[in-house]
Amino acid sequence: MSSSSSIPNSPPPAAHTFIAGEEEYRLERAAAHMGLEQGRMPKKSWAALLYNDLSARMHSVGYVGNDERVDEYGTLHSLRRRKKRQPQEYDQLADLFSAPSSSSPSRTRPQRQQQQQQRQTVTDLFQAPSEESGGQTELVTDDSSEEVIDMVEGGSLGAAAFGIVKGIVGPAILYLPSGFYKSGWAVSIPCMLFATGMFVYNAYRLLECWKVESDRNHKVESRLKEVQALLQHADEKKMNHKNNMNGNIYNNNYNNHLESGEQPPPPPPPQQQQYGATVVQQDSLFQAKLLTYPELAKRAFGPYSIFVDLGISLMQFGVCLTYLIFVPDNLYQCGKALLGIHSFSKLTFLWIMIVIEIPISWIRDIRKLTTTNVIASLLIAFGLLAVLGMAFFQGLQTVVVDEATGESELAFVQNMQTLKPATPLWFPIIGTSFFMMEGSIALIVPLQQAVYRPEDQAKFPDLYRTCAFYIVLCYISFSLVTCAAFGSHIKTALTASLTGPLATIVQLAYSIAVILTFPLQAFPAMEVAIPLLFRMTTTAPSGPVAPTVTPLQRNLYATAIVVALGLVAMVSINYLGNIVSLVGSFFGIPLGLVFPPLIHNQLVKDSTPATKLKNYCVALIGFVAMSLASVNTLLTWDQGAES
């Protein structure tokens, strides 16, 4: 922590940074004496880790909360308000050993003198102040005064690893086993490893672009400050000369008025510093933006970065679309198992979910959903463990192979024999392999920025690579176990393949988790799509100030988007596997394979010709994979229907 500025309505100026890891108030007082105004504190609690995950989703599209600001270097600051504390006052050495009373907010001087008289021996120094004397070591504070705590918050590599796992692993893991079984293990495993390798390669490219642009922000701001200092120095000379001339003129007029007996005129007001027609009112001449995937694309492609914005938006909406199909399917199974209800169709549960999601989608600061994010994370973890437990239980059951001889074998063995190495319908696994990342490519830069130590920031790319490959190995193992357990009965919504009382609990738990996860996935897409829709549907008035989206307008656009997703889910309610493959191939592959290497070629000017050629090859591979997988999914659409 640190001392702070007392400006209530504006962020304090940038200052030096110190890293704190000890007792809060002692370091705050020490920092105040050293003139440090901002701290950089790691967040360590589990609640803070989940809070950071939500912050990363907000920052992935450049959205900054009301309690945050971006300084001239592109660094994100957190602003906290609290009642202003006055420095402590000690009259005697004995006051250092007095415990503050919780019942009395302050201690007056007569009370302090009375307490000092009661201390007759050295041992009295270590006695807690009596209730009668109301011992308190703090001065009376003005409750109405506030101070702004300006901090650059960050986390450790452990917190970053948690954010990586939380950003990648989600309900999409339940879509993999079906695609794995339909495509064959000899095709699915290489596709998943290839997708992860390409994903990591392009993550390195984006992080290198972030480093280059971050250094550029610092250089530009430093040079502009040097120019500003030179201009101010030259302007001060001019102002001093002008003030001297004005002073001489004023003195002459003053003397003339005194001689004539008239009232002398008031002195002239001080001149504002101006450069041309611009009044200098702030120290920063360069307003940096939060570096994100869309911002890097804008710097690389200019107006053509709209394709990246659309890709991020449509990818996240595609994930939300699968949720609108997944949840009604599970709730439909729960309704049949618990209540024996067959009259409610999947469409009924679909529109119930839409009614729930509409008001939640109005929330702009998704950090307010930390509690629901905790609940969803716990339910997803419970669901995955329960599915694995049921898969092992199902696979270890014996199945009669030959009724005449009574020969039997484990379900694992029998189902593995039906799992083919490859099938003619293997193309959908390409899109599914990229869908499994759930568009987390946009979270890479915010997670990198959230690491607070420079030496840890240098280790973050390798950490991301390690986490990604461990995650894909878990995905492959999960797919093999579930395919061997359920065999040909497996569905795209894996929980819908389960039977029994525990299956109903898992289906209900996962449905609640996905309902709570929906607004978190939709938020980045909303922040990109709503301004685009606003510009398309609003006639810009003539004037220098562009119109902005009002809260009411944003809520209306968000409602329309959720309803539109519901309409698409209606016509594709039985084609979840096709939706997963199409979204992953048409939107996930460009975001993960095509755009990052092209951005790298534009922003990293000192890349070698070999690196640029490699980037072009990766982008070409991504374009070919996107085209083949998307076209094949559309051509074989009817074959992916599920009842």
Image (cartoon, grey):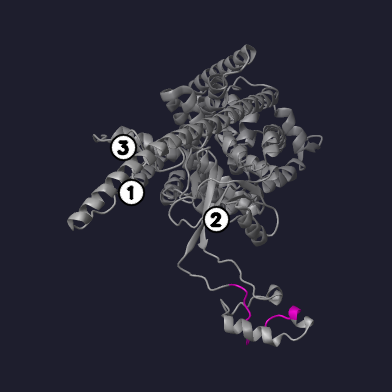
In the rendered view, would you say 508 is above or below 633? Answer: below
- Indicate which label's residue lies in the foreground, 3 or 1: 3
Q: Which residues are magenta?
A: 125-138
Kindly report the distance in space between the C-alpha atoms of the residues bearing marks 1 and 2. 36 Å
Residue type, mark 1 in image: Leu
For the residue carrying disc 2, how many other residues have a C-alpha within 10 Å: few (<14), some (14-19), or many (20+)?
many
Residue nearest the observer in this picture, 594 or 99: 99
Instruction: Indicate which disc, 3 or 1, sits on the residue closer to the N terminus.
Output: 3
Q: What is the number of the mark on residue 552?
A: 1
| Image coords of residue 354 (percent x, y) | 43, 47
Kindly report the distance in space between the C-alpha atoms of the residues bearing marks 3 and 1. 18 Å
Query: For this view, does 320 lie left or right of residue 92?
Result: left
Residue sitting at x 46%, y 48%: 349
Residue nearest the observer in this picture, 446 or 30: 30
Q: SS at mark 3? A: loop
Q: SS at mark 1? A: helix
Residue type, mark 3 in image: Ala
For the residue carrying disc 1, how many other residues have a C-alpha within 10 Å: few (<14), some (14-19), or many (20+)?
few
Residue type, mark 2 in image: Ser
Residue nearest the observer in this picture, 504 or 113: 113
Q: SS at mark 2? A: loop
The kind of secondary structure the magenta stretch mainly shows is loop
Query: For this view, does 50 lie left or right of residue 529?
Result: right
Q: Which residue is mark 2?
A: 4
Q: Which residue is mark 3?
A: 546
